[in-house]
Amino acid sequence: MSRGRITTENPEFIKLFRTLCGGKYQTWQVWSDFIYMTAAAISNRVDNTHFDEREEQYLNIISKYTKTEAEIFPKMYAELVKAMEISTEQDFLGNLYMQLELGNHWKGQFFTPYSICKCMSGINTKNLVERIETDGYITVNDPSCGAGATLIAFANSVNNELYHKKSNLNWQNHILFTAQDIDTVTGLMCYIQLSLMGCAGYVKIADSLLYPMVSNDDLTYYWFTPMYFSRVWQYRRIFHGLDNLMFSSKKSKPKDIKTKKEPSPPEYNVKLTEVKAGQLALF
């Protein structure tokens, strides 16, 4: 993980983005299309359970654009990856979201500045190495994650603590990230950034007060990061005896999510890890 300087500017991304805006497409539409297609492309590499419906939605979105226009989206994704490779010490998508004035003021969307998230995470990571060594892993949860700035800052703080203590532990193998947001676009922004950072975990798109993460939950609105499917985390779920936490598609279905209605899938074989070992809640 990069410890480079914090960077919030990416003129090339904005230049590419604005070539699609105006005329046929509104700014919000282009942004939400980019976010969903990026999230679906990441998810469909690892999560076969949701592949069909997310692939169908991806194809429906991209079909609106001409071939020349469609070629801009992977270039935007490349700029996103490049920015996070330069430094993970930033909320890249969240900063762009606010910079482009895409926040929904009727929902009260205003993302906490990364510097504040960094300060908050620093408080929560004290003695973390000892806690990981004792419990084997910890879980960090943000029930109103936005673009994921708090979780990103937490990951960076943990990495820095391990580095300064000269620990051989790899934070990616010992921290489970769980997040939830009522807004589909911002929740998927969090999912994308956690995925690119190599965080193991999942994001649920739903109201965390009405539809919190529970046993026997509906997985339709869950987005699992690629790292969650790694061999390390597969073994960890088995060794901690968590495979009995089978989640069903029949319970706790959010009714207020403004997204394409998806068909009711069969019982899922994806299992979620219980939030218990050294749990931290970030707000």
Image: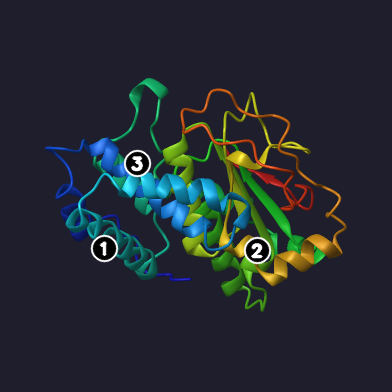
Residue situated in front as seen by the camera: 262 or 108: 262
Q: Do residues under tags 3 and 1 come within 8 Å of each other at their CB atoms?
A: no
Label 1 – label 2 distance at C-alpha: 27 Å
Q: Mark 1 points at which residue?
A: 75
Callout 3: SS: helix
The answer to whether 69 is drawn above or below residue 31 in the figure is below
Q: Indicate the amino acid at tag 3.
A: Ser
Residue 145: x %, y % from top left: 52, 40
Number of callouts in the render?
A: 3
Residue 176: x %, y % from top left: 66, 56
182 lies left or right of 31: right
Which quarter of the picture shows residue 228?
Answer: bottom right
Label 3 – label 1 distance at C-alpha: 16 Å
Residue drawn at the location 62% of the way across and 66% of the way down: 172
Count neighbours of disc 2 (C-alpha within 10 A) and say few if under 14, some if 14 to 19, many if 20 or more: some
25 lies left or right of 125: left
Q: Indicate the amino acid at tag 2.
A: Phe
Q: Mark 2 points at which residue?
A: 229
Residue 116: x %, y % from top left: 44, 45
Callout 1: SS: helix
